[in-house]
Amino acid sequence: MSKVVIFNGSPRKNGYTSKLLEQVVKGAESKGADVIEFDLNDPGIRGCQGCYYCRTHDGCAVKDYLQPMYEAINEADAIVFGSPIYFYQITGQARVWLDRTFPMIEMNGQNIKPRHPDKKLITVFAQGSPDPKVGEAGIKFVTDVLVRYGWKLEDNIHYCGTSYNPDLATLEELSLRAFKDGENLVG
Ligand SMILES: Cc1cc2nc3c(=O)[nH]c(=O)nc-3n(C[C@H](O)[C@H](O)[C@H](O)COP(=O)(O)O)c2cc1C
């Protein structure tokens, strides 16, 4: 059975990021995937402590809400990450999570090697501005890190213009795309 792990960096459970992620989940589940979700807004999450435990161990010394994600990622076939754009970047909650993914790489001097490569990756972003350029640098930043883990970007969904007159036709189109992305994660 395909295993899919979702990371939701939006605090709004009915927001656009959550809605689009939900479509990915529905698509994956419709094909029989086993889906686990992590809410990056959970108050039980601590930031990276910079202890460097993960430089000598495949895992993290911080025992919190996120601790089960390491085993979930190791076993996963696919990772799905979503975040709103806040101040041209991913949310603070998502940024805290990103630091906690440091165990995904092994470092031997200058040589960086992914510990858990070859997973499919889908990313989802929502932003207030209708101009896609606003979120571009933030999206590139997080995608560059995740791709460095050997995760293969299958699709990047970026819904723009939520603060004004959200374009519901585009949202519908992206929702269908997200569902299909979910289906395609399986098999
Ligand atoms: C603190 C904060 C900062 C934001 N900064 C930006 C921004 O820099 N650019 C932008 O287009 N939208 C910005 N927004 C708007 C959000 O991206 C937008 O409301 C988006 O739909 C939120 O995602 P969600 O619907 O999944 O919650 C910001 C919103 C908040 C709360």
Image (cartoon, rainbow, N blue to C red):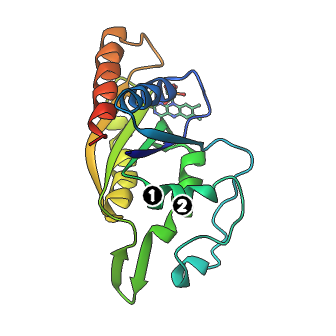
- Pointers 2 and 1 in contact (C-beta within 8 Å): yes
Q: Quadrant of the C terminus?
A: top left
Q: Secondary structure at mark 2?
A: helix
- Inspect the image, locate mark 2, and give the three-letter code of the amino acid beneath it: Glu
Look at the image and tell me in which quarter the N terminus lies.
top left
Can I make out residue 104 in this image?
yes
Q: Nearer the viewer, residue 169 or 58?
A: 58
Residue farthest to the right? 44
User: Height in image: 85 above or below 144?
Assistant: above
Residue most extreme to the bottom: 109
Q: Position of residue 73 (x, y in %)?
A: 47, 57
Asked where in the image residue 51 lies, by quadrant, the reply is bottom right
Judged left or right of residue 4, residue 99 is: right
Residue that numbered label 1 is attached to: 75
Q: Is mark 1 within 8 Å of ligand 1?
A: no
In this orientation, which residue lies closer to the viewer: 184 or 102?
184
- Label 1 secondary element: helix
**Structural distance between the alpha carbons of marks 2 and 1:** 6 Å
- The image shows residue 4 at horizontal and vertical percentages of 43, 44
Q: Is residue 101 positioned above or below 17 on the image?
A: below
Mark 2: few, some, or many residues within 10 Å (few <14, many ≥20)?
A: few
As drawn, which residue projects farthest toward the front? 1
Residue highlighted by disc 2: 71
Q: Is residue 78 above or below residue 68?
A: above
Q: 73 left or right of 27?
A: right
